Amino acid sequence: MATSGPSAIYIHVPFCPSICPYCAFHVVVYRAQLVDRYLAALEQEIAHYQGVYPDLVVETVFFGGGTPSMLRTEPLARIMSQLRHWRWPENVEVSLEANPVTISLETARELRQMGITRLSLGVQSFSDTVLRFLGRQHDAATARQAFQCFRDAGLVMSLDLMSAVPGQDIDTDLRAALELEPDHISVYTLTPEERTPFANLKIDPDAEAYAFLRTNTLLPQAGYEHYEVSNFARPGRCCRHNLAYWENRLWLGLGPAAAGHLAGQRRINYRLRQYLAAWEESRQWYDDIPLTPQDRLKESMIMGLRLREGVDLERVQQFSGLDPRQVYQREIANLVAAELVELVGKRLRLTERGLWVANRVAQEFV
Ligand code: SF4
């Protein structure tokens, strides 16, 4: 990794075929005219950072959203060739999030040809009833076809599932996912987010606990390494880009509402309308939030504890200038006594028991 600056690049693509009732991301319904303005702004933003960081060596790129697979392949290829103006080693990981309704084998091949290496497919469930409840536009058969298209095109395949959805049979969903033999599986609990139609949805805590138990049992039994609280990978197939977040390294966040982590600050881009207006009027398109040493320490602990191997305390000290063993002496002692975390060499990591209450453990470092 280049040490002087960011080497991970996140690109937010805020367009979706429709808005799912549980979604709290910054997204809008796809409109061709908005997309054209978005692409023009994004290309300017990339050019801007190529001036600021001319020596950047790209390690990973992640097209997230939103539904990046809704972009036509021609502008996507243009963005890819613009990104290649930076130094671009052989093994750059380029991930793209895809919605099963947006895919054909021809598109999948074009994505592979332009240098996309990894596909994250938002399947969520293999039950058509659950998919309808979630407001998804695809059914299980479409998801399987889309998966096969990408696999046939030679992409590393990551499959996203949701858990604790009312009416879901998690065992059936996990088994259906395993039958497809993806390289990577992410399983996130359905969370009722404020200001979404699902805000008042009640999640059954027993269903949530059962899903957690079955996920953490069936996937490792099938040979997947549980490397982050919600993520599982076949050997060598962890998402390197997401590791940059969990290890709290530096990254560029491009596109509307994208958050970046630059030396000493968090940079948050304006949301779509303001972002477009800012670029069209040659104004600033982001807010910078300075990060104090305490902020860096806190963020590194919270993100790093999500990794099953734990957070590297020496690295956190180097990065923040503060010694987490001193600052959090009491918290760490209490959590160790409660058998929720353990110290292994220079790392602090969640125990099996701590994994069940990972969010509550993280709260101790806020
Ligand atoms: S497809 Fe994903 S990003 Fe788009 S609205 Fe649904 S959940 Fe949100």
Image (spheres, rainbow, N blue to C red):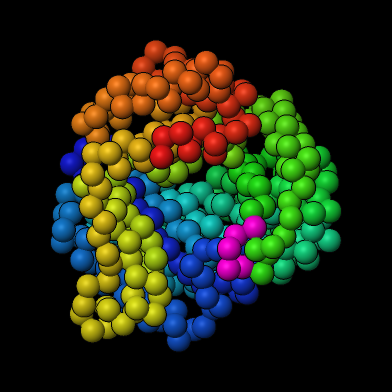
Occupied quadrant, residue 181: top right
* Stretch of the chain drawn in magenta: 192-196
Check the image and report above or below for 318 versus 46. above
Q: Residue 194 magenta-drawn?
A: yes
Seen at 81% across and 50% down, the residue is 168
State the residue in front, 66 or 192.
192
Between residue 63 and residue 244, name the one nearer to us: 244
Q: 365 or 291: which is nearer to us? A: 365
**Left-right relation of 91 to 158:** left
User: Looking at the picture, how far across and down is residue 8, in whole percent?
Assistant: 34, 48
Q: Looking at the image, which residue is at 44% across and 18% down?
A: 333
Q: Is residue 7 left or right of residue 98?
A: left
Reply above or below: 285 against 228: below
Would residue 229 be seen by someone viewing this image from the given angle? yes
Q: Quadrant of residue 177?
A: top right
Q: Which SS type dominates the magenta stretch? A: loop
Query: In x, y percent, where is residue 164?
Result: 74, 48
Quarter of the image with the N terminus is: top left
- Residue 167 in the image: above or below residue 104: above
